[in-house]
Amino acid sequence: MTTAIIGTGLMGAATAQRLHDAQQDIIAWNRHAERARQQLGEHVEVIDSLAEAVARADTLLLFLSDAAAIDATLFSLPEGALRDKVIIQMGTIAPAESRDFLSRATALGGDWLESPVLGSIPEARAGTLLLMVGATAAQFERHRPLLALLGKPRLIGPVGKAAAVKLAMNQLIAGLTASFALSLNFVLAEGADVEQFMEILRDSALYAPTFDKKLDKMLTSNYDNPNFPLKHLDKDVRLFLRAAGEHALNTAMLEGVEKILQQGLAAGRGGQDYSALRESI
């Protein structure tokens, strides 16, 4: 069975490497083929043509930036290209978008399910991602062996449910990081001891491990080599705001965080680690 990685950005490339190390038959496609070859080296064959990559593969793992990218690539293929293909969407898109793709892929003879992940490049390479799967029970059991190579798959429910849980998780990333950055900046501005602040925080119910993961970046203002860029977090926050609005939820808090993210983008920090939002605060 051949698996095609469609989109070799940060997570796509790391997943391709993980599956290669697990001795899976892997090929890859990326809009910028040469960039993908530089990322993957000789380990994974990069196919120049999307149509050829899809034709050669049994399973497609989608690591595309958003729903628009999925629509412009996968659903622009010639008629019949998706027939009998297993399509596993692993990026972050809105629940309604995933359900729409399910309907369209099924009409084209494809087998669509979603499996967005929690974790980043280190977890992808180590095979310790948390995978939230939106599928039928039969689909989940059928594709669990492949997904288990990437981490811990959990069936959330039908397509759209996993996308919702993933957005809820990424909203927490934004909220936790912004709150921690605000507190850290306040401690620094008052001249209080940062390590004492952290020791108390670590011993409290308020602590989240992400605080220590981002502390050094924030203290040194070094946001290079991101596992999750600020621009991607901003995209996910805007997706959450739109989806939450459909349920009449009060999103005033997150709207404030989104303004901070927009300030970071305007300052040219979109490609930096998302903890760079501290600079806007």
Image (cartoon, helix red, strand yellow):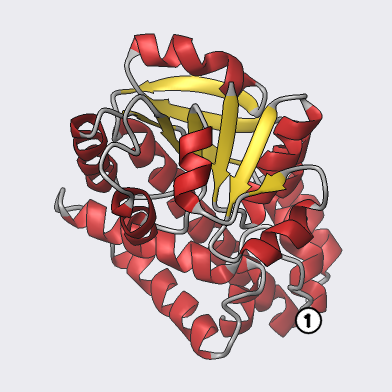
Residue type, mark 1 in image = Gly
Residue 139 horizontal/vertical position (percent): 39, 15
Q: Is residue 21 left or right of residue 129?
A: right
Write down the quadrant of residue 36 in the picture.
bottom right
Quadrant location of the N terminus in the rendered image: top right
Left or right placement of residue 82 versus residue 181 in this view: left
Above or below: residue 79 compared with residue 229? above
Q: Which residue appears at 48% of the width and 51% of the height?
A: 50
Tag 1: Cα neighbours inside 10 Å, few (<14), some, or many (≥20)? few
* Residue 96, above or below 135: below
Q: Which residue is mark 1?
A: 191
Q: What percent of the width, then of the height, locates residue 104?
A: 20, 39
Task: Please say if 274 is above or below 9.
Answer: below
Q: Which is nearer the eye, 187 or 2? A: 2
Residue under the image location 70 percent in, 25 percent down = 24
Residue closest to the eye, 82 or 14:
82
Instruction: Indicate the secondary structure of the residue bearing disc 1.
Output: loop
- The residue nearer to you, when weighing 193 against 48, is 48
Pinpoint residue 132: horizontal percent, then vertical percent: 47, 30
Count of numbered badges drawn on the protein:
1
Which residue is painted at 62% across and 75% down in the image? 271
